[in-house]
Image (cartoon, rainbow, N blue to C red):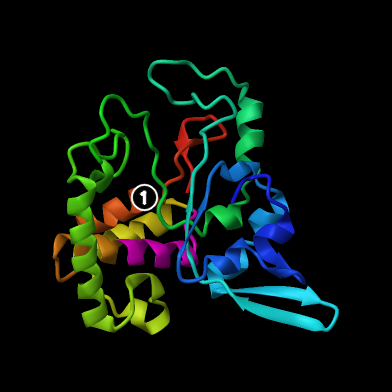
Amino acid sequence: PHHGSSTAGIVGSVRGPGELSLAHRGLLFLDELPEFDRRSLEALRQPLEGGVVILSMARGRVALPARFQLVAAMNPCPCGFDGDPDRPCGCHPSDRRRYRGRLSGPLLDRFEVRVTMGRRDGADDGRVADADAPRSARVGAEPSAAVATRVARARAIALRRQRVPNAALAGPALASLALDADARDLLAAARQRTAIGERGVDQVVRVARTIADLAGAEAVMGDHLVEALAFRARPWHDDDHGERAW
């Protein structure tokens, strides 16, 4: 959907389901995320948490299915050049904060993977281009076709192990995942050093388990956890003080 879409068009109304329900069991891509209406953005939280959209109508409340994979994209700042190695950003720090502030903390907290994408130069060879991205998303990784094969294999491994994808793990099923000693120590250290909450811990463990499956590893090891933590870091510096926000 376009970022100028109405909240009713995104969420749904008496006239019919919105984009959230139309994307059920599929992928919802929101480009220029901060440009969407704040009400539309906040409405994402409920389906991301429970897989349904609740609409209030004259005859009562209606629940529509809305279990989708959300992919979003945004510029790092209003001018788009914050962090660019070749062109300086022309935005005032307050403008950058205001732009990023359109995305609430609770909404950002529901994104389990966050990656900074650099500008693409030359021919498109299907590779991700960014030196600051976590290891599995850097230049030099496999082309997209090879990654797709590994993803399908990793998903099959997860389904054999627990009958549901890693993204669906919660509660006792999530707690039962095998983490080696290094991974457990790193997770405990991350909880002490950062403001990561229980939801964030669960997200990191799910992503780390997926990284381990992609690598064909039986247990989640320290390297897998470090990479999952790197994917969780927000792709900008908090308040322009040079500190990554969690």
Residue 205 among magenta residues: yes
Farthest residue, direction front: 15
Q: Nearer the viewer, residue 75 or 199?
A: 75
Residue that badge 1 annotates: 231
20 up-or-down from 227: above or below: below
The spot of residue 197 in percent (x, y) is: 49, 62
The residue segment tinted magenta is: 195-207
User: Left or right of 142: which side holds 134?
Assistant: right
Q: Is residue 178 among the parts visible in the rendering?
A: no
Quarter assignment of residue 26 = bottom left
97 up-or-down from 53: above or below: above
In the image, what residue occupies the spot 63% across and 45% down?
Answer: 3
Predominant secondary structure, magenta span: helix
Q: Nearer the viewer, residue 64 or 196?
A: 64
The spot of residue 5 in percent (x, y) is: 68, 50
Q: Is residue 160 among the parts visible in the rendering?
A: yes
User: Left or right of 52: which side holds 179?
Assistant: left
In the image, what residue occupies the spot 57% across and 24% down?
Answer: 79
156 up-or-down from 106: above or below: below
In the image, what residue occupies the spot 18% across and 60% down?
Answer: 150
The spot of residue 234 in percent (x, y) is: 46, 44
Quarter assignment of residue 46 = bottom right
User: Left or right of 86: which side holds 18?
Assistant: right
Q: Secondary structure at mark 1?
A: helix
Residue 188 among magenta residues: no
Q: How many marks?
A: 1
User: Left or right of 160: which side holds 3?
Assistant: right
The spot of residue 210 in percent (x, y) is: 27, 64
In the image, what residue occupies the spot 25% across and 41% down?
Answer: 126
Residue type for callout 1: Phe
